Image (cartoon, rainbow, N blue to C red):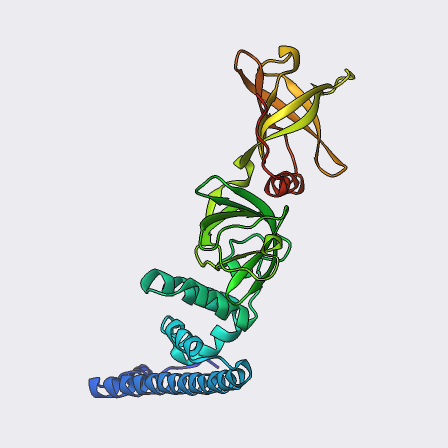
Amino acid sequence: MPIILDEQKLTKFFYDISRGFQQSPLQILLALALLLLFIGFLIFMYRLQKKRLRESRNLRYVELYEAAMAKLNLNPSELHLLERLARYLKTPERKYLLLVNHSTFNACASRLCRQEDVQEASLSALRIKLGFKAQDPERIPSSTAELPQGLPVLITSHTGKRVTGRVAGSQPQSLIISPTEPIKLPCGIEVRVYFQNRSGVFSFTTHVQDTLEKPELAIHLAHSETIRQTQRRAYYREKLSLPIFIRPAGSEEKPLLSAFLDLGGGGASLRNPQNRYEAGVDLELTFLPSGADRLSLTAKVIRASRGGKVLHVRFGTITDSVRDRIIGFLFLKPRTRKSK
């Protein structure tokens, strides 16, 4: 049986449906207002929750700070210094981080030293009292208070005096150096101290303080918060006279005795035995940088000087541990004059 559609009724049906999708401007504005109100409510609740969380966290920081301060027993000058450091925090309520977070302390101390007049020794003393030690050996220390015990150092003065030794420890007011040989430096004399870690060679300027019993066995230096990189490890050099045996690399020839004139982490200058070698030659170098630990390296002759009597060589591929052995030896070896 065929289906007969009433065209008039069908038109009316579609017309009624289409009217359901039509809204007046007032209704549209009301819907948008409700939507914006809902979004605003969500934003308000988020910010309110975030504020409560921040207040709760800050309250916890204050409680931790007060508990830590009760154990530290800082004196008034140290408390004042801590307040000065806290000015460089984003939120002063986080003063607790200055007591436990080394990076936070370093960042605030660095800004304080750049922008205000502060006694570096006081900062170093506060570091020690808070228990901050050396961080990653790959990084530059922020203070002499962070130098690890046993670190080789080289002390030089404007008079040309040179003292080698190791860090023996740190006190709140001084860095203690154990010299390689007994020596007494004048109290108050300004010195520059060099040391090296895996990142390079660094130095700082300080002065000698009063020493205790047997001062020749320990050097007390004022702490410093200003440590600068002086040379890349590969190019640090020291003048010295040290026996060395050399021969062409890969050969079975009998090594010839020679001597270093200077030595560094990346190369050296040495006497040319019998004026035998010239630029471009690869050599095998064997020497004893310390004790009985023999060291063998390959090096290329870059140039010759003094009528061929002196060779300037660049080391081939060597490991960081070997380079560190060389520089550590330079810091610990007493100065010897070059022979003529």
> The C terminus lies in which quarter of the figure?
top right
Q: How many numbered dots are placed on residues in this image?
A: 0
Residue 82 visible (yes or no): yes
Residue 12 visible (yes or no): no
Horizontal relation, residue 84 to residue 125: left or right: left
Q: Camera-side residue: 187 or 111?
A: 187
Q: Quadrant of residue 28?
A: bottom left
Q: Camera-side residue: 273 or 196?
A: 273
Q: Residue furthest front?
A: 213
- Rendered position, 136 above or below 130: above
Q: Residue at x 53, y 74 (%)?
A: 100
- Rendered position, 188 above or below 89: above
x and y, in percent, of residue 159 in the image:
45, 41
Horizontal relation, residue 90 to residue 141: left or right: left
Q: Residue furthest left?
A: 25
x and y, in percent, of residue 200 in the image:
54, 45
Q: Camera-side residue: 44 or 326?
A: 326
x and y, in percent, of residue 284 in the image:
70, 23
Q: Quadrant of residue 16?
A: bottom left
x and y, in percent, of residue 264 in the image:
57, 34
Q: Camera-side residue: 186 or 339?
A: 186
